Image (cartoon, rainbow, N blue to C red):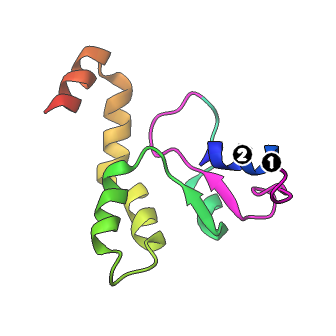
Amino acid sequence: MSVAIEEIKDNKLYKIYNCEKNKIFTRYWNTNVKHSQKKIYYYLDFELLHVPADKVFLSKCYDQIGYKKNFKKEYFNLVNSLKNYSKKKISKILPQKIKNFLKEI
């Protein structure tokens, strides 16, 4: 996504406005991040939400795309779930070797 936006700007195909300020596009990381990030409710009004940390969720959406066009509600339910909250909290305290092992299984 970022590469596409940079190509549009470099080739002057369209004028890019501040997409976040205008609630058009932004990115949300549903994982532990080192930068500060707003609460999930801030992102409800955006037209497009880039969710790079949720590939499993997105792959499930792809399987349902033929009969469903909007996955916003399901995504926000996932992010707000107890399972997701617990996963992020536990992930903060696990050593990296264990995290890598868990990714492999």
Picture mark count = 2
What residue is shown at x 31% (from left), y 58% (from top)? 59
**Residue 42 in the image: x percent, y percent?**
65, 59
**Residue 17 in the image: x percent, y percent?**
85, 57
The amino acid type found where label 1 is placed reads Asn
Residue 81 seen in this snapshot: no
Q: Is residue 94 magenta?
A: no
- Quadrant location of residue 31? top left
Packing grade of label 2 (10 A; few <14, some 14-19, many >=20) is: few
Q: Is residue 79 left or right of residue 96?
A: right
Tell me the CA gap for discs 1 and 2: 6 Å
Farthest residue toward the bottom? 67
What residue is shown at x 33% (from left), y 66% (from top)? 62
Question: Is there CB contact under 8 Å for labels 1 and 2?
Answer: yes
Q: In what element is the residue under mark 1?
A: loop
Find the magenta span and give its range.
11-34
Q: Name the residue under label 2.
A: 7
